[in-house]
Structure formats: structure tokens, C-alpha cells
Image (tube, helix red, strand yellow):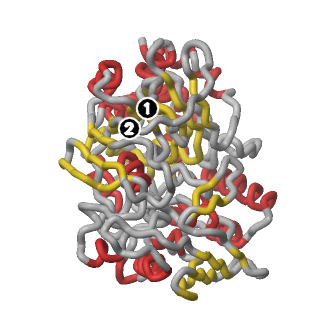
């Protein structure tokens, strides 16, 4: 019955518009109210789904969403960004770019200390960046930083970055992209081995407590350099893996806001008189990775058959109840490319391709062992069965799923292209034939050339053309298929004010307060 309902609604998903790149808006029941002045005091509790891994760039490797919120509370980046994407001075006072675009000089704010009393200065910035760039440290996203040749101390409060070539994404790197790259940790905490468990920064909150699998507590930094902030006394990040329990905690007032992608809860919150919804359209996409280094996914006919058997509108309806957008490429809904060669749902065409292949196709699909992951696996299994493909869905713990992909121990896996200003950075990491992070064994000289050109091109219209060409190449070669576009939801009680938006599913709470 659910599948038939989803198919009836397919047409509306197939004609879904391309929308906006990063749109933030709040849906609040009742009359709009004039915003009062921020008030000081109180404890804010955020409920998240997944446990937090850690906070050291090398040891934790990457941040899960709740971890991104904590890092942004404890540590400061060099720059923030305004609504137009322009750099806003923070720990860095300005960014001076050389005429050839290859040198960035950043004067730093003076009089700032890390929470452990270590002075914030050029030495701290250089220590952080050299550690990221050191190949022996094996920073997970070092390949993203490939154009950064070196960083040097000019004087006690000035640093200079040297790039291999003009690089448009560097503005984003300095102002929040990647979290563990842009935010500056205490060099003392890093060297003493404390940063992963007890992060130390210059931010508005002090790290207080971490009960693994349960909660993290941060408390107001009374000596924060930005006078009058923060407004809250304390922020508690609670790990509540069960979607229903997380939503129940919000309704009962045990949590002030939660992150979720459960359509039923989003729809209920939108109609609830005492709840509000913050919705953020983003770049990136939910996908299914194909391991092209192993049969039968090394054959393009099999990948094409899977693409035609895959019913994205059904997935959107049954998993998300229509609360996330349709995806034909990973660059966000503002990029209008026309026809990108997306392979529509067509079981008959899938069966014809399999007949041409001439062998039985059996797959193992790895997915997270969450309710959402299990539903995704079952829908994919049924879609493939209709075309004659046998699929065994296997649910694993999220961290284990990532490890298995990195170790090349998978056939197909659910995955996510993260919300980034420059998705091409991530695509280079996973699609370039010489990238050490290419775990799908994809190799295309045409894609390599596109990735190389977009890395060095600064002209906006040409960058847009290159993104569209990459989208068409992905849909032709099919290293992965799309499950949905990217949209994040934060459900919150109306007394929560001052959320600075959502990045990669993580609400930014450094200026939040309680009315």
C-alpha cells in the first residue's frame, strides 16, 4: 500500500524545481513577533541522533553533526561569513589577497587567549595548519587542501598562506568549511593529547563534561573576547538515537531543539502550536556508492540497470514523507543545468540492460542500522527485485559502515555527499583517479580534467559550466546514484532564539539565547 501511494505521487517529485542553494527560513505557528533583545542565562539542550567521535583533527578524522555544533561553541574560526558569503572578521581581522591570487595574508586579533591560558597568535595558527598539511599525520581531508602549499608566520599576529594557484574555495576553507580545518585549537592541548577528549579553543563556551554515548556539556566562557557573549550559561548536547524518543523529549520540554530527518515528525511540528521548524536547503546529496572495482558493478550495464530500477520518488515519499528534495546532481538546488542525463525510473529498460549483461546480478547493500537505514535498504531491495536484481540489505553501525568503505570491504553502500560551498572539493577527493580517498575505484580522464580545471578556475560562469559538465559525467558513468537532495531540519521550542543557521545538519548555537 505504501509503495502504491508513493508511485501515485511520483510525478510531482519528478518535476520538482531546482530551488535555492542555501535557504534558511523559520516556520513559526501564529503571528510573527518583533524580536526582543537577547537575554542572558539558562541552559539549552540539543538532541542529536548519532554519538560524537571526538574533536582532534587527526584522531577524530571528521565530525558528525553534533560534534560540529560542539566545535563551533568551543573553538573559533579565523572568519565567519555573512548572508552574501562575504568574510566577516573574527580571529582573523581581514584577508589580503595578492594580485596573482596565490598569497593570502591574514592579520590576527590580539589579546585573545585559549581556555587553557595559552595565547592565541600566529604560532597557534601555523601549528594547526602545518599539522593538517603534514602528509605523515594523514589528516583525513588533506586532499581537500591540496592547493595550499604552505603557511608561515610573518610576525606574532600575522600569518601568510601560500597557494599553488588561485583557488576560489579558500575563502570558504578559512570561514567554516570542514569544521576541524577552520577552527583553531589550543596547540598545548593538541601536543599534550587532550584535544580529542577535552577540546580547548578560544570560543564562547568552555568544555565541561563528556559522558560517551549520552551527553556533552559546555559552559559559558566568562572571559570570552567578544564582550556580552555568549548569552547562555550552558549548552547540553544529548545523544538520543531513537527518532521517536528524541521527538518526545522535545515535546515534553526535556530538549529545547532537535535535529531530525523524520518526515512524520517534521510534518507534526509544522502544525504544532508550540513547536517551530528551521529548514535549510543545502548542497550535497544522499547517495548510494558503487564499488566499481568489484563485479558485477564494474560493468556499466549493471550500474545503468540499477539506476533505472531505482525509484527516487518512492524513496522520498516512504523515507522522508516528501520533506527533502529530488536530486539530479550534487551541487544544490540553485544550480540549473538543464538536462544532466539523469536516468529516470524505468524497470523495463533495467530488465533489457540486464538481459544484455546476461548473468544473474546479486548485490549486498550496506546501510546504517537505524530505522531510516533499514527502510532505505528494504525500499532499494524491492525496487531492484522488480527489475530482476537480488539485493541483500545489511545494516551496520554508522562508524563501522564508514570503516568498511575505507577498507574496500563493500559492494554498494548508502553514503552522503556533505553540505559544502564547493562540492567539487569533495568530488575531487572521491572521484579523481589519483585520489587516495577514491574508494569506488572510479577512473575517468574526462572527469579528472574537469576536476583539475574547476580547481584552478576563478571565473563564476565557467565554474557553473564545469559543475554541470561534472553532473552529466556522473550520470553517464554512474559511480553512484541519488537517493535525495540535501535539506536539513531543526525542530525547536519557540523560546529558543538566535540560531545562526544550519551547516551540514548542525545548528549553529554560539549566539543562541532563551526568551
Q: Position of residue 149 (x, y in %)?
A: 56, 84
Left or right of residue 181: residue 349: right
Closer mark to the observer between disc 2 and disc 1: 2
Residue 377: x percent and y percent?
Answer: 35, 35
Is 308 in front, or is 77? 77
Query: Residue at 49% across / 41% down in the picture?
Result: 306
Residue at disc 1, secondary structure:
strand
Sooner in the amino-acid sequence: mark 2 or mark 1? 2
Residue displayed at 41% across by 21% down: 265
> Label for residue 358?
none
Q: Residues within 10 Å of mark 2 (few under 14, many from 20)?
A: some
Pinpoint residue 16: horizontal percent, then vertical percent: 66, 28
Q: Nearer the viewer, residue 238 or 61?
A: 238
Q: Position of residue 486 (x, y in %)?
A: 54, 40
As drawn, which residue projects farthest toward the left?
A: 211
Q: Going by the image, does 51 lie left or right of 272?
A: left
What residue is shown with label 1?
A: 514
Asked if residue 273 is positioned above or below residue 217 in the image, the reply reads above
Horizontal side, residue 188 vs residue 501: left or right? left
Residue at 32 percent across and 55 percent down: it is 206
Q: Badge 1: how crowded within 10 Å, few (<14), some, or many (20+)? A: some
**Residue under circle 2?**
41
81 or 113, nearer to the observer: 113
Residue 437, visible in the rendered structure: no
Marks 2 and 1 sit apart, C-alpha to C-alpha, by 8 Å
Front position in the image: 301 or 281:
281
Against 104, residue 267 (above or below) is above
Quadrant the N terminus occupies: top left
Is residue 422 toward the left or the right of residue 461 in the image? left
**Whether label 2 touches label 1, CB < 8 Å:** yes
Image height check: is 159 above or below 398? below
Residue 20: which quarter of the image?
A: top right
Amino acid at each position: 500500500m505504501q509503495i502504491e501511494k508513493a508511485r501515485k505521487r511520483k510525478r510531482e517529485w519528478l518535476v520538482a524545481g531546482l530551488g535555492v542553494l542555501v535557504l534558511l527560513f523559520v516556520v513559526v505557528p501564529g503571528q510573527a513577533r518583533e524580536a526582543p533583545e537577547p537575554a542572558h542565562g539558562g541552559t539549552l539542550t540539543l538532541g542529536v541522533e548519532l554519538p560524537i567521535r571526538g574533536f582532534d583533527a587527526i584522531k577524530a578524522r571528521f565530525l558528525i553533526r553534533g560534534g560540529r555544533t560542539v566545535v563551533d561553541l568551543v573553538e573559533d574560526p579565523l572568519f565567519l561569513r555573512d548572508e552574501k558569503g562575504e568574510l566577516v572578521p573574527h580571529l582573523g581581522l581581514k584577508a589580503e589577497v595578492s594580485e596573482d591570487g596565490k598569497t593570502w595574508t591574514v592579520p590576527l586579533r590580539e589579546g585573545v587567549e585559549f581556555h587553557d591560558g595559552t595565547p592565541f597568535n600566529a604560532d597557534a595558527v601555523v601549528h594547526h595548519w602545518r599539522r593538517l598539511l603534514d602528509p605523515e599525520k594523514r589528516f583525513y581531508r588533506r586532499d581537500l587542501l591540496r592547493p595550499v602549499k604552505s603557511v608561515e608566520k610573518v610576525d606574532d599576529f600575522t600569518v601568510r598562506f601560500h597557494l599553488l594557484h588561485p583557488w576560489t574555495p579558500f575563502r570558504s576553507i578559512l570561514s567554516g568549511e570542514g569544521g576541524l580545518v577552520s577552527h583553531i585549537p589550543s596547540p598545548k592541548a593538541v601536543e599534550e593529547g587532550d584535544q580529542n577528549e577535552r577540546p580547548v579553543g578560544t570560543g564562547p563556551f568552555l568544555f565541561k563534561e563528556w559522558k560517551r554515548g549520552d551527553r556533552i556539556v559546555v559552559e559559558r566562557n566568562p572571559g570570552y573576547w567578544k564582550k556580552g557573549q555568549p548569552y547562555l550559561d550552558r549548552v547540553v548536547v544529548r545523544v538520543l538515537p531513537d527518532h521517536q524518543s528524541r521527538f518526545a523529549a522535545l515535546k515534553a520540554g526535556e530538549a529545547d531543539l532537535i535535529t531530525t530527518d523524520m518526515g512524520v515528525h517534521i510534518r507534526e511540528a509544522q502544525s504544532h502550536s508550540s513547536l517551530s521548524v528551521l529548514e535549510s536547503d543545502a548542497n550535497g546529496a544522499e547517495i548510494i556508492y558503487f564499488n566499481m572495482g568489484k563485479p558485477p558493478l564494474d560493468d556499466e550495464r549493471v550500474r545503468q540497470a540499477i539506476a533505472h530500477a531505482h525509484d527516487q520518488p518512492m524513496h522520498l515519499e516512504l523515507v522522508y514523507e516528501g520533506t527533502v528534495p529530488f536530486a539530479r546532481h550534487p551541487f544544490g538546488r540553485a544550480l540549473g543545468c538543464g538536462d544532466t542525463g539523469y536516468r529516470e525510473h524505468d524497470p523495463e529498460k533495467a530488465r533489457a540492460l540486464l538481459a544484455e549483461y546476461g548473468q544473474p546480478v546479486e548485490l549486498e547493500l550496506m546501510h546504517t542500522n537505524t530505522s531510516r537505514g533499514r527502510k532505505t535498504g528494504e525500499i532499494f531491495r524491492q525496487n531492484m527485485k522488480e527489475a530482476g536484481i537480488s539485493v541483500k540489505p545489511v545494516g551496520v553501525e554508522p562508524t563501522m559502515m564508514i570503516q568498511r568503505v575505507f577498507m574496500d570491504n563493500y559492494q554498494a553502500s548508502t553514503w552522503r555527499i556533505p553540505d559544502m560551498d564547493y562540492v567539487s572539493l569533495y568530488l575531487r577527493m572521491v572521484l579523481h583517479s589519483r585520489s587516495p580517498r577514491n574508494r569506488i575505484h572510479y577512473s575517468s580522464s574526462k572527469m579528472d580534467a574537469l576536476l583539475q580545471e574547476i580547481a584552478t578556475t576563478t571565473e563564476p560562469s565557467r565554474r557553473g559550466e564545469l559543475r554541470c559538465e561534472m553532473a552529466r559525467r556522473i550520470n553517464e558513468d554512474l559511480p553512484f546514484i541519488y537517493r535525495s537532495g540535501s535539506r536539513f531540519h531543526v525542530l525547536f521550542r519557540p523560546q529558543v532564539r538566535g540560531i545562526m543557521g544550519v551547516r551540514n545538519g548542525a545548528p549553529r548555537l554560539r549566539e543562541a539565547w532563551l526568551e
